[in-house]
Image (tube, rainbow, N blue to C red):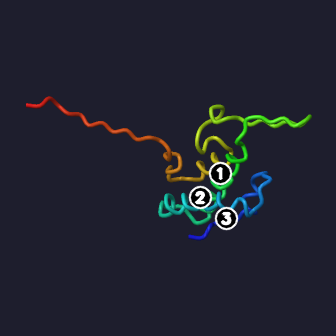
Amino acid sequence: MANRVTGDEVKNILETIRTSDQIEHYITAANLIVTEDLVGQGMSDERLKLIELYLSAHFVAIDDQRFSSHKDGEASASFMGASSIGKGLELTFQGQQALVLDSSGILRSKGKKQVSFDVMGPED
């Protein structure tokens, strides 16, 4: 399926130095998740587009924040690490928005390990 959002739309909600063309592979990844995991879950096309937008922005934000701090002369920048504010989609504001928009709960369950146990009685 064709991407639902453009690089320019992502740049409208996220400050980044990346060009719209550089953002395309993040959009493609978000599109794959939305198309394979969320289509058919009862959400409107508008909602799916917003989820794809925020997932794309989340992926860009994660990649933009690869370092925890940097100083260049008098200018400096610092970013919170994953252990500071959450993991997965909870790590960024954009990921949190995608979670809120996903009424199916599928994105929230992604990455969580499922464990099952089989209880066996004594053999006769």
What number is the disc on residue 20?
Answer: none
Say left or right for 113 vs 50.
Answer: left
Q: Quadrant of the N terminus?
A: bottom right
Q: On the image, numbered disc 2 is attached to which residue?
A: 29
Quarter of the figure with residue 116: top left
CB-based contact (under 8 Å), mark 3 and mark 2:
no
Q: Name the residue at 74% across, 37% down.
A: 79
Residue 59's tag is 1
Marks 2/1 in contact by CB < 8 Å: the verdict is yes
Q: First in sequence: mark 2 or mark 1?
A: 2
Q: Residue at x 69, y 47 (%)?
A: 63
**Is disc 1 in contact with disc 3, using a CB cutoff of under 8 Å?**
no
Mark 3 or mark 2: whose residue is earlier in sequence: 3
Give the residue number, with chain letter if any, for mark 3: 5
Task: Measuring from the top left, give residue 3's x and y in whole percent.
Answer: 62, 67
Amino acid carrying mark 1 in the image: Phe
Q: Distance between the residues labelled 2 and 1?
A: 9 Å
